[in-house]
Amino acid sequence: MKHILPYVTKPGRYIGKELNESVKKLDDLLLHGCLVFPDLYEIGMSHQGIQILYHLLNNEPSIYAERAFCPDIDTEKLLQARGERLSTLETSTPLASLDFVGITLPHELCYTNILTILNSAGIEFLTEKRSENEPIILGGGACAFNPEPVADFFDAILLGDGEEGVIEIVQRLTKAKKDNLSRAQKLRILSTIESVYVPSHISFTYGENGSIKTISSSSEQQLPITKRVLPSIETYDHLLSPLVPNTRIVHDRLGIEIARGCTRGCRFCQAGITYRPVRERSVEQILDIAERSIESSGFEELALLSLSTGDYSCMSDLLPELMKRYSKKQVSVSLPSMRVGTLTPEMMDEIRQVRKTGFTLAPEAGSDRLRSVINKGITENDLLETAENAFTLGWNHIKLYFMIGLPTETDEDIQAIAELAKKIIQIGAKRGRGRSKVTISVGTFVPKPHTPFQWAGQLSLDQSREKINQLKRILPKKGITLKWQDPEQSYLEGVFSRGDRKLSELIIKAWEKGARLDSWSDHFNFQRWCEVAEDCGIEPAAYLQERGKKEIFPWSHLDTGVDVDFLDLEHQKSLTQTYTPDCRYHGCQQCGLCDFETIEPLVFESGSSYYDRTDSRSFSEISSKSGSDSKFRYLVSYERLGPISYLGHLDFLQVIFRSLRRAKIETAFSQGFNPSPKISFGPAMPVGTESLCEIFIMELTTPLEDPNAALKTLNDVLPQGMKATSLVLTKKRIPQTLVSEFLIKLSDPLTQDEQSQMQRFFDSKEWLITRTRKGRTQKVNIRELILDQRQDSDTELTIKILTRTGQPGVKPLEALQQMIGREADDLLSSMVRKMNWQELDLQT
Ligand code: SF4
C-alpha cells in the first residue's frame, strides 16, 4: 500500500512501523494471519483487546499475527482504482493470502466496515462462497453474543474471554494446515473447540409470523455455545511492551486493565452480564505492569481500565501510590470510567490533580424511581453530593449522561432530568463559581440481548425525537447545554443488536449503495438504510418491538453463562423497583455463572501496606520540583527516511517526546496547567518529505554524563526510519531564517515546455500565488522564496528554498509545480528529500 501514501488523507494510518510492533521472518512461520479492527486506525489502535491478542499470538514463535484496519473512504477508492489489495501493516502482505483473518466485533455500526475490509482485501463476503485458498475469517468481541446480522460473513466466532481461546484456535489451525485439510474440515475442527461458534453449521426455521421456530446444529457443534471465562486475569501474560502509535489516536495512552467484569447489576447493561464475574488484578501486579510498560513505551498517560474503575477494591491503595510515583515523571494517571458512589472526596482530590476536563457523572435516568427500575443503585442525594464535592474541589463543568426510553419511563422522568440539572447548576452558583456549566448528554436506550431488558421494546424514531424536543423545551438555557446522540444511529444500532441473519442481505445492499463508516455521524445516511430495507422487504421496526417471554431470540443458542431465569427475575424486580446488590460485596445473587471451583469473583482486600509512604510531599510540591529551571541545552540532529516521513508534524513531536522518555533522557518541563517537555523544533516539514538534516533543541535539568552514549540509547528506541545523527551541548536557538536544499526525483522526465516554463519563472521578479488560511486570502510572492535550482538529470533536480519563521513559506512540491507548471497530482509520487540547510540569521 505504500505506493498510495502520497495520495491519501492521514497516510500515517497505513505505514505501521510503530514501536514494539512484532517483526518475524515469514519463512519460519507455520501460520500467518492478521488481526483487524473494523474502524479507522485511530479508533482500532485505541482498543485494548486488539493489543492483548496481538501480544499473545505473537508470543508464539511459529505464528505471526499482523494488523490491518478499515481503510478510509479515499483509500478504499484508491485501492480499487489501482487494482491493489488491502494488506497488513507490518509486512504489506495481502490479507487474501493469509491463513486467517481475525476481525473484532466492537459495536453494531461497524458492520459495513467489515465488508469494506473484505472487499478491499479481495475476500468473498459470504463464508459459503469462499474458496479453499481464502483465509479463515474469525470473529470475537462485544457483539459476538448476537453476531447473527453478520454471521454469514464469518467462518467462526469466539465467545467470551479471548486469551485462552485464540491460542487453541491457532494451534488447531496450524495442525490442520500441516495436515493439508480442506476448508470444510477446518471449520469442523473449529466447531469442536469450546466456545467457538461456526455459524454455517447452525440453521434457523421461522414460523408464519416471522418469529424464529427452531435453531439447530448440523455438526458436532453442541447448542447452546457457552462463553469462555478466564478464571483469573492475573494468570495471563499482560502485554508489557504495548504498541506505541506514531500518529495520533483517540486514546493515546498506556491502558492497564485493573479488573474485568462488573456485577453492579445495572439492568440495561450488556457488558455487566457478558463480562461476569468480577476478576481484579492485584495492586502489586498493576504497579509492576505500570513500571515496565511506561519504560518500554514512553507514554505520558496511564489509564486504569475496567467497566467501573472506582469499584476496584484497592483503589485507595493504588491511586495515591501511582500518583506519587508518576507525578514526578510527568506521567498522568487517568480513571476513564468512574461511578457515583465510588467517588470519595479523597479520590476526587487525587483525580483533580491530573484531570483537566469536565467532571462526568452517569445518572442514566432523571428520577430516583427510574434509577431503581434500572438497578443503578444511586440516589439524587448521592449525585448532588458528588456534584457539590466536584464544585468545591475546583471543577466548574459537570457532564451528565442519561438514557431516554428506559422501560417504564414517563414524562415525569424526563422532567426530572431537567430538575436535576437545575439543582446541580444552583449548587455550582452557591459554591461561588459563577461560570459553572452543566452538559446533559442523552442517548436512546437500546434493549440489548442477554440483559434483563432484552424483552423490552425500543423507542420509535418519532418518540426519540419528541423526548429530545421535550428536553430542549424544558431545560433552562443559562449554564446548561444539551447534547444528544443521533436517534437514527441508535435506531440502527437497536436493529442490529436484536437482529437475525436476514439482515446480512440488508448490510450487503447498503454497503453496495455506499454505506461506509456508519458510526461516524458525518458519513451516516439513514435515508439510504431505509431505502435499502424497503428494497429487501425488511421492516426494521419489527426488530425493535417488545418480545414475548417465550420467544426464541436470534441469540438464544449463544450462552453468556448467566441463566435466562435470572434475567427474567431481574426483569420482574425492575417492575417492582426491587434492588439487587453487587455480588462482589453482598454474596452471590444466583445469576448462575460461577461454579465456585474454577470460576468465582476475585476481589482483593484493601489496606495493604506494600508501599513506601515516607514521601510526604504533596502532588503539587513534587510536580513543581520537576519543573525547576534548566541550564543544559542539547542540539539533536536526526534523519527521517521512508514511510515514517508521512507522519504529520505533531505526530513527530509525540514520537520524539516518547522516544526521549524511553531513552531515559529527562527533559525539563514547562510550568503551568499542562506541563510539556521543553523542546524546540526546526520548521515543520511537509508530510511525505524525507530529510537528512532535521533538528531539535532539548533542555535538560542535569547535564548528560556521556552524550555519545545517550545518542546510542536514543537510536535504540527511535522508530524505524528515524536516526539521530548527533547530540551536542549548544548555546544556540533554533534558527529563524534558513535556506534548505531539497532533492526532488520525478517519476516522469521534465519536458521541453516545462524547462521553458522554469526559465520564465526564474527570469521573473515576482510570482504570486493565492493562499486562503482561516478565511483570509493572501497573495504570496514565491519567487523570492525559491532561490535557486540545479538539474542533475531530466528526472532529478535540487531546489533551494528560503524559510522565515512566522512568514508564509512554500513547500518543495508546491514550488516545483509553480516552476514547471505540472499538475499537482502528477507530482505526488515524486521523492522529496531535504539534503541540508544553512542559517541566514543566526541567533545565539
Ligand atoms: S454466580 Fe453469583 S457470584 Fe458469580 S457472578 Fe453470578 S451472582 Fe456473582
Image (cartoon, helix red, strand yellow):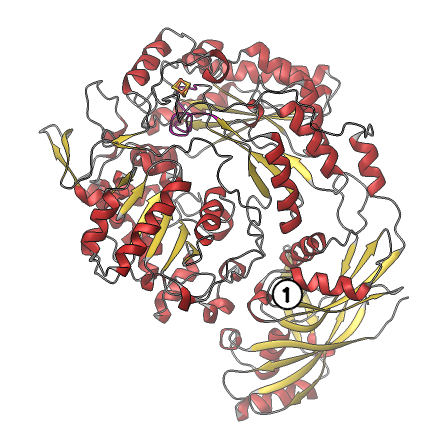
Q: Check disc 1: other Cα within 10 Å, few if <14, some if 14-19, many if 20+.
A: few
Q: Please give the range of residues in magenta.
A: 265-278
Outermost left residue: 208
Disc 1 target residue? 771
- The quadrant where ligand 1 appears is top left
The one of 526 and 492 positioned closer to us in this rendering: 492
Image quadrant assignment for residue 773: bottom right
Residue at x 90% of width, y 54% of height? 631
Residue 269: in magenta span = yes
Residue 103: in magenta span = no
**Residue 422, image x, y percentages:** 59, 16
The one of 231 and 90 positioned closer to us in this rendering: 231
Image quadrant assignment for residue 587: top left
In the rendered image, the quadrant that contains the N terminus is: bottom left
Image quadrant assignment for residue 565: top left
The one of 310 and 420 positioned closer to us in this rendering: 310
* Residue 251 visible in this rendered orientation of the protein: yes
**Residue 577, image x, y percentages:** 40, 8
164 vs 442: above or below? below
* Residue 515 visible in this rendered orientation of the protein: no
Q: Is residue 234 left or right of residue 186?
A: right
**Residue 52, image x, y percentages:** 48, 45
Q: Main secondary structure of the magenta part?
A: loop
Q: Is residue 689 left or right of residue 144?
A: right
218 vs 729: above or below? above
**Residue 742, image x, y percentages:** 67, 79
Residue at x 43% of width, y 51% of height? 57
